[in-house]
Image (cartoon, grey):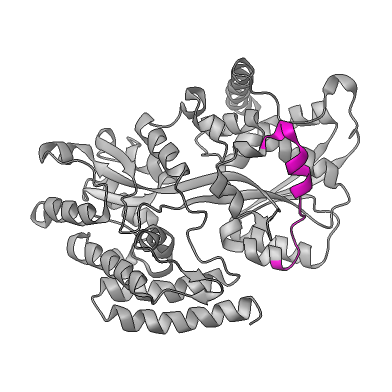
Amino acid sequence: MKLQRTRKFWPQVLFGMFIVALCAGFGITWGGSVDAAKGKPYAGTKIRFLAGNHNWTELLRPYFKEFTERTGIEIEFESLPEEQLSTKLAVECTSRSKSLDVFMFRPLQEGRLFMKNGWLQEIDGLVQKDKAFDLKDFIPSTLEVVKDKDKIAGVPIVTEREILYYRKDLFKKYKLNPPKTLDELMATAKRLNDPSNGIYGFVARGQRAAAVTQFSSYLRGFGADFMKDGKATINTPEAIKAFQFYGDILRNYGAPGVLNMNWPQAAGVFAQGKAAMYTDADSLYRSTVDKDKSLIGEHVGFAPFPAGPAGARPYNVVTWALGVSPNSTKKDAAWEFIRWATGKAMVMLTQQGGVPGARRSIWKRSVGTKGFPKELVAVINASASIGVSSDRPLVIQVGAARDAIGDVITAAIENRDVAAAANKANQIFQAIIDKDFGK
């Protein structure tokens, strides 16, 4: 048993050593501020890191020992499923536990709650003055969602964007180009829709709340948004057109059962060759190209999310970030860990392992994108400059807000009165906003 674990561990460590050496060759240095040759100012310090079960964590863990050797900081590590993590963080932060130092959190799902309750230590001063950390290297939209009143309260670690997946073989057969606008998307879906032969023109999430994040890019493409200046705006003329578009394309050219589709079901339809096009997060690309999961892997193409009347406004979001507990008595050591974990060398390593990071310099280097299809890298880089920092309403009751908005998506797919559904949902959403922000 020990031999098996050793065989699994050493290739991972040797790979890491290779990446670190390669990083040095490209001028990318180890992310910590401590110089091991000058002693260990944090010797004997132990920090507690509460993390979510994620590939990023698994890629980082083998290098905790190296971090300890360089800094003297020992890491007490605990990993939980995301919902359990959220609950545990809430309990510990509410009780002002001093044993918690660093943690992973989901900025879009629980960030506003954590900020409102004071559960995130503001680290703006540390980040801004740390030239070696190079804050300007982060994709701008990824920093917006980790700010509390313009002050940085977390550091992005995992990102994703909405893109268009398409069948290259079908596009070649019918001499088509990937659609650049939403009107072209609709026309292409109609052109390639062939139910009699088991192929549908388009697939995407249609399940109530789950569809809201992917619908956000359509909503903004039509010039609308979830809310503005504390007011719900999902019943504006632009928003209603976006809902109608999304419902029409899924109802007329989508695969059967779309109302029950979250990402696994929608991605599965596309991977099985039953849909010509699919819009969803770029982080799901492996499920479409993996030979063990996809029948069309060699034919999958990637393109930027199509532009609507208001232009292309795909989300470019942070799904996970690192924060410091305001109750920690070891904030300096906690920051030392974060700046190492999110430094260029470690982002290079985790991105090589398939986790899309937030640093622009890594995306621009071929060594940093080695594990991603070249076509996809080009789409990711193009999306970085136009991406929107959120894919859902930035409120505290995120789940309730998504349910209300999801009701309108359902109405649109079922070809019911979209305007009526939007007006009803807007009232519900406004009540959520008022309650969350004390109005």
Q: Is residue 304 left or right of residue 341?
A: left
Q: Residue at x 47, y 70 (%)?
A: 402
Residue 213 makes an appearance in the image: yes
Quarter containing the N terminus: top right
Instruction: For the C terminus, give its image quadrant.
Output: bottom right
**Image point 89% across, 35% down: which residue?**
42
Label total for image: 0
Horizontally, is 402 left or right of 73 in the view?
A: left
Q: Quadrant of residue 382?
A: top left
Q: Position of residue 187 (x, y in %)?
A: 16, 55
Residue 270 picture location, percent across and down: 27, 48
On screen, 76 above or below 349? Answer: below
Q: Is residue 119 magenta?
A: yes
Q: Is residue 235 magenta?
A: no
Q: Does residue 3 sit above or below 333 in this rendering?
A: above
Image coordinates for residue 238, horizontal then vertical, percent = 34, 69
Task: Write down the region rendered in magenta.
Answer: 116-134
Residue 310 percent coordinates (x, y) = 35, 58
Decide which of 110, 90 is in the foreground and name it: 110
Q: Residue at x 62, y 41 (%)?
A: 57
